[in-house]
Image: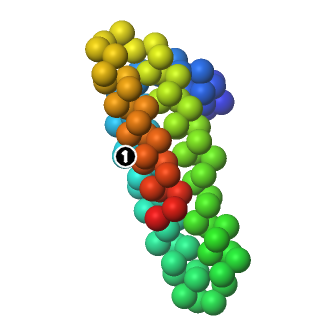
Amino acid sequence: MKNHVMRLWRGEVGMARVFWEYAIVYGSLANLITTGAALAVLLAGFPALAVAIFFLPLPYNVLIVVAVWRSASRYAGPPMWATLARVAVTVWAVIATIA
């Protein structure tokens, strides 16, 4: 597990896989679940805990943004796709963090 996280951090996992699988599928799912849980906890009257739950996926989001960014620099295809992946994952992370 630690080895795989390090491979992600260094950008050694393919850009398409990191973007679609780790960011869009797993990351979006994690952010949706924690947002729902934070809302439920907030409605139960625990605002500090709700904030903590809401920001729980933040380290994962940072890891994935770095992973996409670094894997894009290794991408052998058209440079346009690497640029689009970098922009899209950054927008995704911002939206996931504030929404």
**What residue do we see at 65% from left, 30% from top?**
2
**What residue do we see at 40% from left, 15% from top?**
75
**What residue do we see at 52% from left, 37% from top?**
64
Q: State the image quarter where residue 43 is shown.
A: bottom right
In this view of the protein, which residue sits in the foreground, 82 or 55?
A: 82
**What residue do we see at 43% from left, 46% from top?**
91
The image quadrant where one finds the N terminus is top right
> Residue 3 at x, y = what percent?
63, 24
Q: Which residue is mark 1?
A: 25
Residue flagged by tag 1: what amino acid is it?
Val
> Residue 40 at x, y = what percent?
52, 81
> Residue 49 at x, y = what percent?
68, 75
In this view of the protein, which residue sits in the foreground, 14 or 69?
A: 69
Q: Secondary structure at mark 1?
A: helix
Relative placement, left or right, of 65 versus 91 is right
Q: State the image quarter where residue 89 is shown.
A: top left
Relative placement, left or right, of 72 versus 46 is left
| Number of other residues with Cα within 10 Å of mark 1, as a class: few under 14, some 14 to 19, many 20 or more | few
